Structure formats: structure tokens, C-alpha cells
């Protein structure tokens, strides 16, 4: 289970403090695929970073009683001077994952071929995203944090990615943030809308989408 208790997040701007998240409390139960809709700049990625532990709230607390992935869709955590294979080994050691199993999965899934032996700073943005996505799927987590990732690769790779998501949903939970209603409709069981710092929960995905699209 993941629980947010009275989460607030503010950033300093030249015009003063800007509140992005304002006193949010919610529980993300296990085995429930949860979607959060919001416009660009609403604070969706900020919320996921706090859930992952990559960023701290201004006040409040995040309780994690389960294993939580890094942000899928975010590839900035790779060391650019290391090869794809070397980055995999490094991350496997951090998460105590089997290096051989993870590497075999990522090589097959990402389809990067010889680029696995090349420094990541030579990759295109799409190649980095494939490496990050493949690595995320290679390690088991109770919760997968997904930030606008569905457009990676061509149509065939996107189809393969969705099939892998569907397999993960059989034993894990997805927490998906997006500005795209179809992404939430495709992957989630319930949904909320993030607007003006507030997280508005709806009993079903279609109700959340209707509210979001009528803003």
C-alpha cells in the first residue's frame, strides 16, 4: 500500500511561492490500477517523484509499505558515459536483481542490439526510453509509476509494451499519470483528476475523464 498524508508542495518563483499540491491525502491500495489525469503543469510528475522518493514534499508524508519503481518514462537516471549493459549492471546491484536475467530480458525487449555496448550518451531519446522501459519491466515491483510512456517506439513496439503492461497488472499495480484520456482508459481501473493543487477522486474512470474533458 502507498499512502499520502497531507502532502503539500511549493516552489519558489520570482513572483513568490507557487503551490503545486495542496494538502493531498489518499491511499493507493494494492492490486488496483490507478490513473491521474491533469493538464500540463498540473503537478502530475511532481506527485509521482514524491511517491518514488526522488523528491520530498514541502510538508506531509509519503508512506510506502510495498516496493515502488522509479518513474517509467524518465530516462535521466542513466550514466551517459556507461554503456547500456553497464548501466543495467549498476542498477541491478542497487535493486539486488539478478544481472543475467535482467540483461537477457532487456536485450530481447528493447531491441537495441549492438547499441547495448555503446555509451548511453550516444543514444537517441527513443533508444533511451526503450532501455528505461525494458529495464523497468525486467525488475519486479509491487507498484509501477508510469509517466506518459505509451508513445515509445513504433506501433509494433507500443503493442508489445501494452502486452507487457497487461501481464504486470496480473500481479502488480500501475499508477499512471497522463494528460491523455485514452492512456488512462486503456490501463486503469479507477481515476482521479489533479487540478488547482487538489486531487479529485472519482468512482470510475469514465466519470474522471468526463470531468477532466469538461474543465
Image (spheres, rainbow, N blue to C red):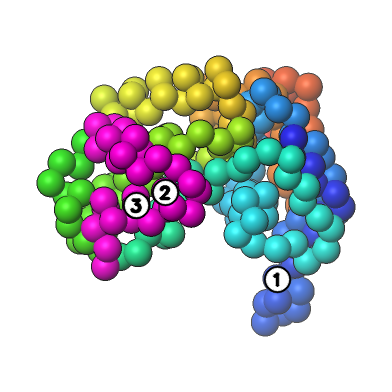
How packed mark 3 is, by other alpha carbons closer than 10 Å (few <14, some 14-19, many 20 or more), is some
Specify the farthest residue to the left. 114
Task: Reply above or below: 187 against 150.
Answer: above
Label of residue 11 in the image: 1
| Callout 1 touching callout 3 (CB < 8 Å) | no
Q: CA distance from mark 2 to mark 3?
A: 5 Å
Q: Is residue 175 left or right of residue 199?
A: left
Q: Residue at x 22, y 61 (%)?
A: 119
| Callout 2 touching callout 1 (CB < 8 Å) | no
User: Counting residues from the N terminus, which is met first, the one under dot 2 or under dot 1?
Assistant: 1
SS category of the residue bearing label 3: helix
Quadrant assignment for the C terminus: top right
Q: CA distance from mark 1 to mark 3?
A: 35 Å
Magenta-drawn segment: 81-109
Q: x%, y% of residue 184?
A: 57, 29
Q: Residue at x 27, y 63 (%)?
A: 82
How packed mark 2 is, by other alpha carbons closer than 10 Å (few <14, some 14-19, many 20 or more), is many
User: Counting residues from the N terminus, which is met first, the one under dot 1 or under dot 3?
Assistant: 1
Residue at numbered disc 2: 92
Q: Is residue 20 left or right of residue 93?
A: right
Label of residue 89 in the image: 3
Magenta segment: does it hold 83? yes
SS category of the residue bearing label 1: strand
Q: x%, y% of residue 182?
A: 52, 26
Counting the numbered discs, the total is: 3
| Callout 2 touching callout 3 (CB < 8 Å) | yes
- Chief secondary structure of the magenta span? helix
Question: Of circles 1 and 3, which is in front?
Answer: 3
Amino acid at each position: 500500500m502507498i499512502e499520502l498524508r497531507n502532502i503539500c508542495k511549493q516552489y519558489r518563483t520570482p513572483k513568490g511561492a507557487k503551490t503545486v499540491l495542496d494538502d493531498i491525502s489518499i491511499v493507493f491500495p494494492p492490486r488496483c490500477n490507478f490513473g491521474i489525469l491533469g493538464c500540463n503543469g498540473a503537478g502530475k510528475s511532481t506527485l509521482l517523484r514524491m511517491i518514488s522518493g526522488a523528491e520530498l514534499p514541502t510538508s506531509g508524508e509519503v508512506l510506502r509499505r510495498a516496493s515502488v519503481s522509479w518513474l517509467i518514462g524518465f530516462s535521466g537516471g542513466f550514466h551517459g558515459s556507461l554503456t547500456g549493459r553497464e548501466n543495467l549492471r549498476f542498477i541491478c546491484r542497487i535493486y539486488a536483481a539478478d544481472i543475467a536475467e535482467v540483461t537477457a530480458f532487456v536485450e530481447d525487449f528493447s531491441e537495441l542490439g549492438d547499441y547495448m555496448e555503446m555509451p548511453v550518451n550516444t543514444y537517441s531519446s527513443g533508444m533511451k526510453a526503450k532501455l528505461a522501459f525494458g529495464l523497468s519491466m525486467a525488475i519486479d515491483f509491487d507498484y509501477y509509476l508510469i509517466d506518459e510512456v505509451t508513445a515509445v517506439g513504433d506501433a509494433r513496439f507500443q503493442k508489445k509494451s501494452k502486452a507487457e503492461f497487461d501481464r504486470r497488472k496480473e500481479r502488480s499495480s500501475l499508477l499512471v499519470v497522463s494528460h491523455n484520456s485514452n492512456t488512462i482508459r486503456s490501463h486503469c481501473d479507477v481515476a482521479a483528476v489533479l487540478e488547482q493543487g487538489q486531487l479529485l477522486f472519482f468512482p470510475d474512470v469514465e466519470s474522471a475523464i468526463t470531468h477532466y474533458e469538461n474543465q
